Image: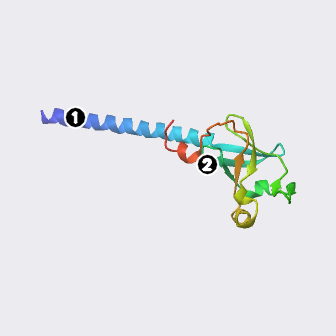
Amino acid sequence: MKKGILIYYLLLCLSFISYSQNGIESLNNIRIQAAKESVVKILFDNIAMGTGFIINSNGHVVTCMHIIDNEKIKFDTITQKILNKIEIETYDKKRYITEVHDYFISGIGHLRAKLYDFIVLVPRNRDNRKFKYFPESCSGKR
């Protein structure tokens, strides 16, 4: 009797381990797919210049400063705005015109962006879309 209970217990444990492993792999696959969906292509005057990733549901994108701050940049010194068309292209191939977040236009924000080579882009024409973003997507929730 004890031998039968022991065998039953071992089989139960093995099936649980197998189920848990499959569950972990499934969750990891969900996380990988969600992370992919948060990556965007950065287009500068319709030319692909690099990538970034969405960090919140409003579509704010973190990317490298050197992607935006290149030799073709046109800057209006009065309005403190970049005149070039900067867009993001999402995983589903939709494009959104963006602006550089105000913090990074001048002053300490601009200096930090140059020093650490990062910048935040904000989509203008998002039509109230809620974007999938990287930290949230890694929770495995859908």
Residue drawn at x 25%, y 37% is 10
**Identity, as a three-letter code, of the amino acid under mark 1:** Ile
Query: How many neighbours does mark 1 have within 10 angstroms: few (below 14), some (14-19), or many (20 or more)?
Result: few
Foreground pick, 49 / 135: 135
Q: Position of residue 8 (x, y in %)?
A: 22, 33
Which circle's residue, 1 or 2, is located before the other in the chain? Answer: 1
Image: 85 above or below 104: above
The label shown at residue 55 is 2
Mark 2 Cα-neighbour bin, 10 Å: few <14, some 14–19, many ≥20? many
Based on the displayed image, in which of its 4 quarters is residue 87 positioned? top right
Report, in whole angstroms, how far the alpha carbon at label 1 lies from the one at label 2: 50 Å
Residue that protrudes farthest toward the left in the picture: 1
Q: Position of residue 68 (x, y in %)?
A: 78, 54
Colour pattern: rainbow
108 w.r.t. 134: above or below: below
* Residue 67 drawn at (x, y percent): 77, 54
Answer with left or right where residue 76 lies relative to residue 131. right
Looking at the rendered structure, the secondary structure element under dot 2 is loop
- In this view, the residue in front, 113 or 7, is 113
Label 1 element class = helix
Q: Position of residue 79 (x, y in %)?
A: 83, 56
**Mark 2 and mark 1 in contact (Cβ < 8 Å)?**
no
Among the 4 quarters of the image, the one containing residue 16: top left
State which quarter of the image contains the N terminus: top left
Name the front one of labels 1 and 2: 2
Residue 127 in the figure: left or right of residue 57 = right
Name the residue: 70% across, 65% down.
Answer: 112
Residue at the image point whose x is 31% and y is 37% from the top: 14
In this rendering, the answer to whether 129 lies above or below 107 is above
Which residue position is annotated with label 1?
7
User: Label 2 amino acid?
Assistant: Ile
